Amino acid sequence: MKRIVYLVFALMIAAWLPAYAQESASPPAQQESTGAESPEAVAAPAAEAAPAPAAEEAPAAPALPAINSGSVAWLLTSTAMVMLMTLPGLALFYGGLSRAKNVLSTIMYSFASLAVVSVIWVLWGYTMAFGPDVGGIVGGFDNFGLAGIPLPGDASTPANANMKLEIPDLLFVIFQGVFAIITVGLISGAYAERTRFSAFLLFSTLWVTFIYAPLAHWVWGGGWLFQLGALDFAGGTVVHIASGISGLAAAIFIGKRKGYGTEKIMPHNVPMVVLGAGLLWFGWFGFNAGSAVAANHVAVSAFLVTNTAAAAAALGWLFAEWGHGGSPTTVGLSSGAVAGLVAITPAAGFVTPMGSIVIGALAGVICYFAVVYKHKLGYDDALDAFGIHCVGGTWGALATGIFASKAITGASGASGLLEGNAGQLVTQAIAVGASLVFCFVGTFIILFIVNAVVKFRPEQDQEIMGLNHSEHGESAYN
């Protein structure tokens, strides 16, 4: 455990050094222009002290938008709703799907994600995702520790000086932070019931630093996919493809659970699953409609299509399961709704309600078969992080390139294949492919590093006993 602590502190120092070096190497800030370098100043030095005529003064910079209290209220609410998705929403959803002997361990992954990522995001996560662009790959360290982000008491700098939005910059920071939090929690569904908690902590620290933050910069922070024109309204690539494909890498690397394929492994608490799914559905309105970053008509449209796609996907999964497996299950209905929420996430601000029905219904069917037939591919994705989030996110990202409509985005906005813009679908495919390759390969490298420091798998007898006792010394039900 000491090695993990030392490594985390080393990572913090390593993150600080580039910012320090950049600050030390940068030239002194330029003074306000005085005309000392102009030809007129050289020819007539006596004129330096004379005030410039009023007619020649530089025009004042355009005023920044005022803070919109309605948008602030909606974004504060949305941020809290997205946090609710992780804890207790995801914690209950994943916890109910796991076995009783591992339920506390599974819940701890979501709870610890909230704690760990919250601190990392303030220190270096935000600046790597949304700091000044460095080669289209990552944000610079100008905002390390949120340096340069206006604070409420700073009267000299408007509270929204950086983002040019109608909300304070600090609100944008925490809104994006809760996205990073749930993404780390989502990955844990793939390797649940067979991972040491210490390994989880180290893996999560490295993953959010070297995978999530750069990918968020690519798509949202001005990076190369943003410049290419890729559309991702609320996280189809950044959150769902990233978490799902990284979960698959972890499931393959760590290996199958003891008894997988030879004994029946069932969810231990289905009502808990339903409660978690309901909280996820509720919180997703903040996730998607909040990504309009304002209380406006786009937020309203995103709210509507989010609900519609989730409902259509729940029905799609239900009927696929009913026709293929013989029984419509409560777990299936819950999983289908989540699949629809995943698929509509990248498209929420770009598609019509009718488009969302198609996206959701197909997501339910596609994700159902991805989950049902995963055993044929030989990997153990314990709680279907890959089958729902990566598969659903991939479909949603591609569907955005098909169904994006100017009826939502406006006459000068984005459109998709159905409106004659095949290029947008190609761009979406590039974004999907880049996200899959970067996250899968990068996660495998991180897994090797973590496993060299602290083994992922507990001892066999500890895993059979259950991680509630072996990792946390607790019992879920006394």
Image: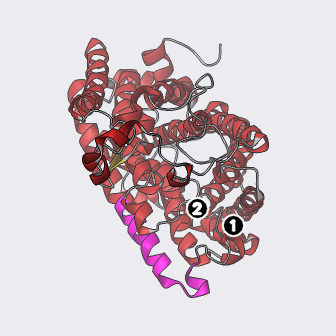
Residue depicted at x 41% and y 42%: 131
| Rendered position, 408 above or below 338 | below
Q: What is the quadrant of the N terminus in the image?
A: top left
Residue at x 23% of width, y 28% of height: 24
Q: Residue furthest bottom?
A: 420
Find disc 2 in the rendering and name its residue.
368
Q: Secondary structure at mark 2?
A: helix
- Seen in the image, is 350 located left or right of residue 253? right
Percent of width and height locating residue 180:
50, 39
Q: Residue at x 66, y 78 (%)?
A: 411
Judged by its main secondary structure, the magenta piece is helix
Label 2: how many Cα within 10 Å (few below 14, some 14–19, many 20+): many
Q: State whether residue 197 appears in this view.
A: yes
Q: Are marks 2 and 1 in contact (CB under 8 Å)?
A: yes
Asked if the magenta segment contains residue 392, the reply would be no
263 vs 6, left or right, is right
In magenta, the rendered stretch is 415-434
Q: Which mark is residue 316?
A: 1
**Residue 237 position within the rendered picture, expressed as x and y whole percent measured from the top left:** 47, 57
Judge whether 426 appears above or below 107 on screen.
below
- Magenta run includes residue 433: yes
Q: CA distance from mark 2 to mark 1?
A: 9 Å
